[in-house]
Amino acid sequence: MSTSILVLVGSLRAGSTNRQLAEAALEVAPEGVDLAIFEGLADIPFYNEDIDVEGSVPAAAVAFRDALAAADAVLVVTPEHNGTIPAVLKNAIDWASRPFGASAISGKPLAAIGSAYGQFGGVWAQDEARKALGIAGAAVLTDVTLSIPGSVVRFAETHPRDDAEVAAQLEAVVRDVAAAAAPQAAA
């Protein structure tokens, strides 16, 4: 039995370092752990309760919720935009939080990691993501963290997968998220 982890990338830019971190996480996942990057965050319309009605929920939101429901755990990889989480990630959290009390993310183990240009590696965005996702119902793993500062310089000529320190840290993050999800994967 494998453990499935859905990866949400808070940057839509194809060459973003956070996208690269997510790709590297897929490569360092231990045997029995399957990670999949959700590719449709940009397609989900802004959350609006008027369109979140059974029978008329936008297809992109349904696909997102289905992917969340199928996963044993979630890994969020986010940059920091103006000191907080990117709008696309906040919108995904809003869709993930519904229906209230019975959402697809409810009780799922979740970790938030990332990189940013600044000296703190995006910790504000990660903290905001943990807060919002915890309120949405996820079982936030507050002790599973990874913040990589100076990403533009650090990864200017190197993909995160080729940085031995980062690869080892990512492997530990994935292993910890998978371990937290093991009881759900066995159910």
Image (cartoon, helix red, strand yellow):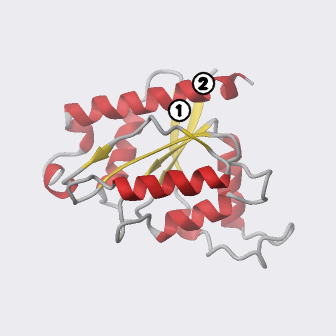
Q: In which quarter of the image is the N terminus?
A: top right
Q: Where is residue 156 in the image (x, y as percent from the top left)?
A: 14, 54
For the view shown, which residue lies furthest in the bottom direction? 50
The quadrant in which residue 79 appears is bottom left
Residue 123 seen by the camera: yes
Q: In this view, does 17 lie to the left or right of 56?
A: left
Q: Which amino acid does label 1 sit on?
A: Asp
At a point 36% along the width and 50% down the height, the residue shown is: 114
Q: Nearer the viewer, residue 23 or 92?
A: 92
Q: Is residue 28 visible?
A: no
Q: Where is residue 48 in the image (x, y as percent from the top left)?
A: 70, 77
- The quarter in which the C terminus is drawn is top right
- The residue tagged 2 is 2
- Helix, strand or loop for disc 1: strand
Circles 2 and 1: CB atoms closer than 8 Å: yes
Tell me how many marks there are.
2
Q: What residue is at 67 percent from the left and 27 percent from the top?
A: 185
* Depth check, front residue: 135 or 6: 135
Disc 1 crowd, CA 10 A, few/some/many (<14, 14-19, 20+): some
In the rendered image, residue 83, in percent from the top left (x then y), is placed at 35, 67
Separation of residues labelled 2 and 1 (CA atoms) = 7 Å
- Lateral position of residue 122 relative to residue 12, left or right: left
Q: What element carries label 2?
A: loop
Which mark is on residue 83? none
To which residue does mark 1 refer? 34
Relative vertical location of residue 29 with respect to residue 20 in this rendering, above or below:
above
| Residue at 27% in and 38% down | 161
Q: In which quarter of the image is residue 124?
A: bottom left
> Reading the chain from its start, which is encountered first: label 2 or label 1?
2
Vertical order, 8 against 84 (above or below): above
Under mark 2, the amino acid is Ser
Location of residue 172 by image quarter: top left
